[in-house]
Amino acid sequence: MNVLSVASEAFPLIKTGGLADVAGALPIALEEHDITMRTLIPGYPAVMGKLPDAAEVAGFPGLVLGKEVRLLAAEHAGASWLVLDSPSLFDRPGGPYAGPDGRDFPDNWLRFAVFAKTAALIAEGLADGWKPEVVHAHDWQAGLVPVYLGAGNAAGTPSVLTVHNIAFQGQFGADIFAALELPWSDFTVDGVEYYGDVSFLKGGLQRASAITTVSPTYAREITTPDFGMGLDGLINARADRLFGFVNGIDTSVWNPQTDPDIASPFYARTMHKRPANRKAVRERFGLDEGDAPIIAVISRLTWQKGMDVLAEAAEGIAAMGAQLAILGSGDASLEYALSSAAERNPGMIGMVRGFDEPLSHLIQAGADAILIPSRFEPCGLTQLYGLRYGTVPIVARTGGLADTIIDANEAALSAGVATGFQFSSVTVDGLHDVIRRVMRVWQDEAVWGRMQRQAMKADVSWTRPSMQYASLYRMLVNEKQ
Ligand code: ADP
């Protein structure tokens, strides 16, 4: 089966977040399900630079929504890419969505409308006759794909829209509608119209044959006003077409046996080698030697991640005898609050500011637990790395965190199936309560060791999710027949 994936970022070509990891890993994982996935990606400078041999696809229209384009094809890193080369839209400094000053590009609506329309033209077979049986669009940047599919000659090609975070919706003024070259009948409540504006995500959610998000719990949560960010009504109306598939991780990159960034490689049977990593973490974070567990935090420092609550709770956690190792960057006020807590508690709270990929690996290998107090979390990757490295996750019971960690309640502990700790209230008291529970289990070395080994047994690979996506594509194709 041929499937076209439409993603505004994909690892290893360009990455700003989790979407890139999913879009990069899925095509490779789908191969064993006899699915040939090609990925359409914009020709940002980073992408063009990594694909110097990309060749033009003959016969593709040179003009899309009035913009000059070329469609290029290339093979790279085990995957097959289609690149939308349109220098006036994509060849500029900055990131995929914003300039060097951090501000969103003012023509993002046009950049990603041309992108979505290109996907629909590919679905018509205009890329050298290659024709996908399903089109899989990701996030608002590809939100118009299902809308263009319905409006064009590819009508009938089933589409999947995956929501990686419903907080990002791609909403623009109504004045852009005419330039989208869609029929006026699409500027309605059944199309892209959203409170008088145009919403790319809303249009896609309305028209996609199926909607997926990155965990079953987040799929349920976005049907509620607390999490739906205004789109809960629509998501509810489409609940029969909504699926939640948890993300996998790249288990070859995140492998404690071969990880080049850690001090002492180990696996489940050689856990005696792990403490050398703990020692290295203590050195990096200026933490005292001793029996205290190291609880790590690796995070964007934002309200979503509960970092304001952590800043308030940090000293109380240290007072309970746990050490904190915090790696993060983000809101300046949160950076300040956390580093002040570290300065006041030398030896017990350590903080490194910044984004440091190799250090994040060392922390996962050396810390005893990883704390993720998010207010909402569509899937979350940090807890999955924690499972893989035997770093016991302590997570808020929300979204993908709730779906991937088995709480160490009495039943789970006695059955030997617990892999971490869940807590429900992202407040100072909630955090202190769960750390108290953690400290009790920590005292019993045998129980803690069993939990670590159980965590390391969890399947965090793409095996299961790729099967789920493959079944969904097959269901959509069968429905059509
Ligand atoms: P989100 O995408 O919402 O930030 P995820 O848990 O899905 O949250 O993914 C975050 C990723 O970024 C993880 O791979 C995590 O290890 C990494 N990360 C976050 N902050 C840092 C940091 N300061 N340094 C290194 N890696 C980080």
Image (cartoon, helix red, strand yellow):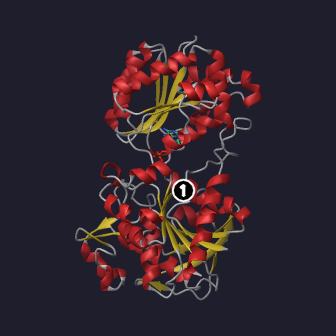
Q: Quadrant of residue 410?
A: top right
Q: Nearer the viewer, residue 211 or 262?
A: 211
The quarter in which the N terminus is drawn is bottom right
- Whether disc 1's CB lies below 8 Å from ligand 1 is answered no
Q: Nearer the viewer, residue 230 or 361?
A: 230
Residue 443 lies, with reference to residue 20, above or below; the image says: above
* Residue 274 image position (x, y, % from top left): 69, 24
In the rendered picture of this protein, how many numbered marks are placed on residues? 1
Q: Amino acid at mark 1?
A: Ala
143 relative position to 406: left or right: left
Residue at 58%, 86% in the rendered image: 126
461 relative position to 394: left or right: right
The residue to which callout 1 is attached is 20
219 relative position to 481: left or right: left
Is residue 410 in view?
yes
* Residue ranking furthest to the top: 290
* Residue 234 image position (x, y, % from top left): 34, 64
Q: Residues within 10 Å of mark 1 (few under 14, many from 20)?
A: some
Q: Nearer the viewer, residue 394 or 144?
A: 394
Residue at 68%, 28% in the rendered image: 263
Q: Quadrant of residue 474?
A: bottom right
Is residue 358 in view?
no
Q: Nearer the viewer, residue 90 or 479?
A: 479
* Residue ranking furthest to the left: 196
* Residue 111 image position (x, y, % from top left): 41, 71
Residue at 50%, 47% in the rendered image: 379
Determine the secondary structure under disc 1: helix
Residue 329 lies, with reference to residue 116, above or below; the image says: above
Residue 114 lies, with reference to residue 238, above or below; the image says: below
